[in-house]
Image: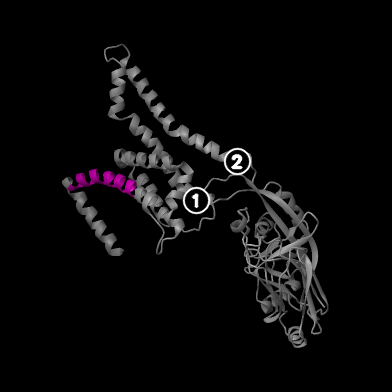
Amino acid sequence: MLAAGFGGAVACRVLARSTKWSARVRDAIPTMLAIGVVGLWVYGYFLREPGGRTAAFDAYAMRTFAWYVTPIGLGAAIVGWALLARRLFWRDPAFFLTVTTYSVFFFYKMRIVPEHFWSTRRFLAFTLPGLMIGLGGLVFSAAGSRTMDAMADRVVDDNETGAPQRASVWRVAIALAIACVVFIPLTIAYWRAAAPVRAHLEYAGLIPKLESLAGRFGDNDLVLVESRNASDMHVLALPLAYIYARNVLVLNTPRPEKRAFEDFITWAQSKFANVYFLGGGGTDLLTRHLTAEPVASERFQIPEYASPRDAYPAGVLRKEFDYGLYRIKYSTTPAVGPITLHVGTLDDLAVVRFHAKEKRDDGLVFRWTTNVSYVVLPSFSPDAREVTIWMSNGGRPASQPVPEVTVLLDDRVLGTTTPGDAMKAYTFTIPPDVARIAGEQEEPPRLQLRVPTWNPGTALGVNDTRNLGVIVTQVDVR
């Protein structure tokens, strides 16, 4: 790179000293830039495909960007940019080179996985303003062309009084007509695309919920928030920390290292009045010495715009927050005894890899399992002899895989069963040796549920793309 830079500097110096070659280069650069921009547009929009080290979102970056201005608008802007660069490059070369170079780099590698249409906002800095200037350049070039001058001359007689003024008026009228042809369709397209979310207020109603939640914590409390790999609780964590000045930490994993976490809680109890945990998706952090006292639970919904990847938002969705708040304490004497867990009700520290809490119209609260889900049993007793799980297949279609559930305690299989449509209790015997090992080990045992999943979106064509196992509503260990 150093050698290339040095060689380029020498070449520029030599060309600058030659009047003949300098003039040729000055004439060639605008044309080369215009041809290059049009060529890259044709390649990026029509020909570029993913493959090798080129990801799909990089290969289709130009096509994704076309959603901002419509494909026709993008093509017109590219042509206008090329014409503008050809005519006015040397008036401001830094402008043309900056916008072009910036755009080429980001169309080549977006350097971000686009989750939806709005993720291409990174183009707003240079590319979109440059594209709009390109559209203006198309109007400018067309209105100032010799063809437009000839049309004005035919309309206005040079011998008439005030002919120059009338010719100027005609040129302005022609320019306005061209501008209308270019911009009015784009304006209509924008207006229609924005209609579903034009009156939408993103996350309306969230502030009162945040104020209520922040009011539960004092200046000397610590709030641990569930990892973003488990739920969206981090959306609440950021304003709690930066707006309401609460002491907030977001976990980096749904399964923190237990011994390190115990040491951290021991330290935190000596520095803070209370240590809270805020979660909703399931986090495995309890041990035999860590207890969780339920403090509060709330479920609410707020409006959130739809986020399709290759289309404009078609409407407003409802984003649901369902969280449980717990006070975490370290105790030198572990609690041991029977376990009753109501899944879907303040269970966030006992379940891992379950789907979000749900509630039916009849009042039943539950969670769907995934292909492998876990229930943490921190107070498991060596004398435990059976585990009972209330399950249902949730109305799984007959065309989908049979929901055969395999139940394991740690790595020991306790049995298998196939739940039906109705909610029913299924009991599994725990062998004495398995119970003794599980009850005496330092790490809390985990009940594991394995089941083939099905996808409602694929099977039924509905707007639910989750991979679902079975419904679980309660777990008892006796």
Locate the N terminus by quadrant. bottom left
Tag in front: 1 or 2: 2
Look at label 1 and name its amino acid: Thr
Q: Is residue 53 visible?
A: yes
Image label count: 2
Instruction: Say which element carries label 1.
Output: helix
Mark 2 residue crowding within 10 angstroms, few (<14) / some (14–19) / many (20+): some
Mark 1 residue crowding within 10 angstroms, few (<14) / some (14–19) / many (20+): many
Locate the C terminus by quadrant. bottom right
Instruction: Say which element carries label 2.
Output: helix
Tell me where residue 291 appears, x and y as whole percent: 78, 73
Tell me where residue 63 appears, x and y as whole percent: 44, 49
Query: What residue is at 47 percent from the left and 36 percent from the top?
Result: 186
Contact (Cβ within 8 Å) of mark 1 with mark 2: no
**Residue 13 or 69: which is nearer the viewer?**
69
Residue position marked by numbered label 2 in the rendering: 196
Magenta part of the chain:
21-39
Residue position marked by numbered label 1 in the rendering: 120
Tell me where residue 278 appears, x and y as whole percent: 72, 63
246 relative to 113 in the view: left or right: right
Mark 1 vs 2, N-terminal side: 1
Query: What residue is at 45 percent from the left and 44 percent from the top?
Result: 128
What secondary structure predominates along the stretch shown in magenta?
Answer: helix
Query: What residue is at 42 percent from the left and 50 percent from the top?
Result: 62
223 relative to 400 in the view: left or right: right
Tell me where residue 423 appears, x and y as whole percent: 78, 64
Q: Indicate whether 360 appears above or below 199.
A: below
Alpha carbons under labels 1 and 2: distance apart: 20 Å
> Residue 87 shows which numbered tag?
none
Q: Indicate whether 388 appears above or below 184.
A: below
